[in-house]
Image (cartoon, coloured by chain):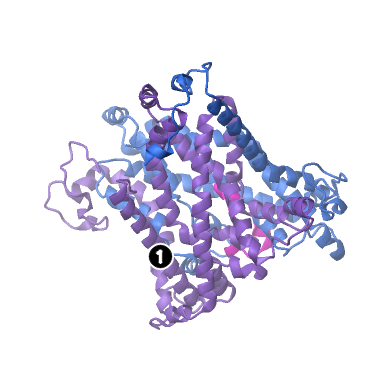
Chain colours: A blue, B purple
Amino acid sequence: MTGTLQKRPASKAARQETGVLVKDMKVSRGMRAFRVFNLAFLLVVVFLTVYPFLNIVAQSFSSEGFINAGQVNLFPLGFNVETYKLILADSTFWNNYGNTVLYTVVATAISMVLTTSFAYAIAKKDLKGRSVFIGIAVFTMFFNGGLIPNYVLISSLGMRDSIWAVVLPNAISVFNLLIMKSFFENMPRELEEAAAIDGLTQYGVLFKVVLPLSKAIVATMVLFYAVANWNSWFQAFLYLDRPELFPVTIYLRNMIAGVTTAGSAGGTAENVGQIAANIQSVTIVLTVIPILCIYPFVQKYFFSGVMLGSVKE
Amino acid sequence: MAMRLEVPPEAVTADPPGSKDKPRNKPNGWKLALKRDWRLYTLVALPLLYFAVFRYLPMAGNVIAFRQFQPGGSIFGEKWVGLKYVTLFINDPSFWQAFQNTIVLGVLTLLFCFPMPIIFALMLNELRSQKFKKFVQAVAYLPHFMSVVIIAGMILQNFSMTGTVNQIAESLFGTTVNFTQDASWFRPMYISSEVWQTMGWGAILYLAALTRVDESLYEAARIDGANRWQQTWHVTLPAIRPTIITLLILNIGTFMAVGFEKILLIYNPLNYETSDVISTYLYRVGLESSNFSYAAAIGMFESVIGLTLILSANAISKRLAGTSLW
């Protein structure tokens, strides 16, 4: 089957082609054409990925006339910062932004405590009941109660309209748990054994030996959880009814869905529909900025986190 | 599970974790384990409580699919009604439309969104400049870090009457299309945005696998006269095959849950015909019309199909490819 799919080696040069390591060797014409195509393709990917963001920024600074005429794409037309002023003066926006920060901090703290302690325990290969504990966690990756029973449960626990409905139900991500577990498993046992001989209890080993050596994975996990919590909206959408409890994602969602239209602060009924695209863009830009600021740092950690988690034997 | 030498290889699963109070005769029973590791068990307690309350209790809560449920009453319902709600949804044409849409979107997602990251990773792997590679990666991961609300806002704006897609359509064909409201355009809109969102980040596990391919395999292939394409076909692809299969199984497992949150944010009654999937339908039935039991019955059907899919995908791949999740 492979024979038909192969191209014959084009020349001796192709045979010498060693790819990654050797740079300046003669390469076949086909190879060179491929490289040009590859580069062009990836540049197109980069452009297409970035474009929607640039478009949103352009729209956020454009005036309604140009947006409605369908003329705004990469650059702002009819420069306008009025909408920024409008949103930045909206107290609901700031209140909701504050809620997002609060929910993210509390939820991430809870998640880290639960995930770290569970991962540390189930990484001990001689812990009795270990495989049951792992099974309990892993099964929930493939089967879950579903929307309705969850909704009924959270409501009957009296968590509606409280921070707990947002920060508790998804506290442990089994994916993150497994990454941490395999990190702990790969730690040299001798370290812990030596600490135990020195008279440290299992708590002592965890806090004084293991965690200080796990800064990289802990930082990665904090980022994983923080980004997920910062971006989450559905829990809040389901369980929070009072606008002063909303995270900023719900503020944006309501704006997109046309439930609230920029609100409280200004915008008369007639022009609200018209400037909707502009207001949405401004809100999107303002919500994205914090993520963009930490992004270069975050994506590096995310990659190493995935690498740590995928190295397991 | 590998055991350490000092522990006799007795079955770890023999005792449920709850049986700690029973006296044991076995020398290495729970009593000894508790005595030695009680601190570890205290670490496990809270997370287990979490799983019990927020994961397993809702699973048990699915029983309301067969019971009458009263808002404010017991979360397990009031009295048995048998298969009433199951027969109800089996005879519900809206359900079957949602079912069909779920399958179509699921298949399209597998066809388009699953292979793209593999191709992307392979193309990145061919780049010789590590700096450029890092740059492309960093940009391509960006959509993954955005809230689905932001993604939805971007989709609706780009596909709006005045958005970029219509600007292009107008300059090329002289017409505009109401993409966000026209049912026949929902699927292209959904899938293209899904590819945009997932292609970069989806490549990350393949890139991780690619860094672990043994360089000597390429060396050997080159000595045998393999060109670059043959090296990719005979060395690279087999090397990342386990990753491909694992991710394929996981993708099949989420087949039924197709982008629920995203669809909920971008669909509207005008395109329900193609956009309404099982999860959004049960959301409306359950939480907007308060038919909890009916929606729970649909939800259970969805989860059971999802579980069946992943179990069979796993079994098939175990037999055919020797790779499996467990």
Q: Residue at x 39, y 30 (%)?
A: B213
**Furthest residue in direction top, as rendered:** A24
Q: State the residue position of label 1.
A: B305
**Looking at numbered disc 1 in the image, what kind of residue is underneath it?**
Ile
The reply, left or right, for residue B310 in relation to residue B136 is left
**Considering the numbered disc 1 on the image, is that residue within a helix, a strand or a loop?**
helix
The reply, left or right, for residue B216 in relation to residue A296 is left
Would you place residue A196 above or below residue A112 in this image?
Answer: above
Residue B68 at what x, y percent from top left? 44, 81
The reply, left or right, for residue A198 in relation to residue A272 is left
Quarter of the image with the N terminus of chain B is top left
Report the span colored magenta.
Answer: A228-246
The image quarter containing residue B81 is bottom left
Q: Chain of mark 1?
A: B
Residue A117 visible in the shown view: no
Residue B158 at what x, y percent from top left? 71, 52
Magenta residue check for A58? no
Would you place residue B59 above or below residue B236 in this image?
Answer: below
Residue in the foreground of this view, choosing between B300 and A155: B300
Residue in the foreground of this view, choosing between B273 and B14: B273
The 10 Å Cα crowd at callout 1, few under 14, some 14 to 19, many 20 or more, is some
Residue A77 at what x, y percent from top left? 85, 45
Residue B259 at what x, y percent from top left? 54, 58
